[in-house]
Image (tube, helix red, strand yellow):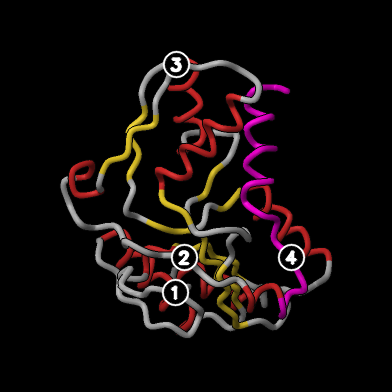
Amino acid sequence: MVYLSKLSNKHNSTLIHFSTDYVFDGLKNNKYNEEDKTKPISKYGISKQKGEQVIINNCNNYIIFRISWLFSEFNKNFVKFVIDQLKKNKDIYAVNDLFSIPTCSDDICLLLQHVIKENLYKHKKCLYHSVNNGEIISWYDFAREIMRIYSSYYKTKSNIISVSSKNFFKNNIRPKYSAMDNNKLNNELNFQFANWKNSLKKTIENILHI
């Protein structure tokens, strides 16, 4: 990040960086905002926190976007995994005690297009929580919603089985609660995120070629 910051400064550019909700410890009981203190509980979270700080300390112009529970029609992610299991009529074990807000990669792309098109990236030193609108859910709730949408098109014999993170992961490196407030981004960048349920439906339809 130091080299990227220096390169950005050299060319008088704005460095756009993606971070994560894992920079928080998960002990808060309402949405995290950009002013909340970071306290990661995993090596991954620590590395992302340090990356943020290097940029803040060294870069003249930057935007840091924190994202949570990213899903897409492409590559490996939770939505594609669940749909694959539904197609095979396999049961799905999903964690019931980790909570956040899913974020669609398509909506992040729309955000970036908006920022670039409107020249909102110039002369910036900003950090934004960049997540979809909508309710805070667990991975279990998320799996059930994926199954509900899938089942409106195809039948499946799969079951969604609720499990605790302790039994599923065998460790405690994920924040229990990491929902983030996106009001700052909405207000300062004049961008309104879609509800994650609407974006999820579109993503699933794309995966199923509907």
Q: Which residues are magenta?
A: 187-210
**Which residue is identified by label 3?**
157
Task: Report, in whole angstroms, how far the alpha carbon at label 3 lies from the one at label 4.
Answer: 37 Å
Whether tag 2 and tag 3 are in contact, CB under 8 A, the answer is: no
Looking at marks 2 and 3 on the same chain, the residue that comes earlier in the sequence is marked by 3
Marks 2/1: CA–CA distance: 7 Å
Mark 2 vs 1: CB contact within 8 A: yes
What is the three-letter code of the residue carrying label 3? Lys
Q: In terms of depth relative to the viewer, which is nearer, 135 or 83?
A: 135
Do the residues under discs 1 and 4 have CB atoms within 8 angstroms?
A: no
Task: From the image, state whether disc 2 or disc 1 is nearer to you.
Answer: 1
Q: Quadrant of the N terminus?
A: bottom left
Residue 142 versus residue 192 in the image, above or below: above
Please state the horizontal and vertical placement of residue 193, each as a whole percent of the image. Answer: 69, 61
Give the residue type that dot 2 points to: Ala
Secondary structure found at label 1? loop
Residue flagged by tag 4: what amino acid is it? Answer: Gln
Disc nearer the start of the sequence (1/4): 1
Q: Is residue 14 left or right of residue 148?
A: right
Which residue, given by chain and number where applicable, does mark 2 sit on?
179
Q: Residues within 10 Å of mark 1 (few under 14, many from 20)?
A: few
Residue that label 4 marks: 192
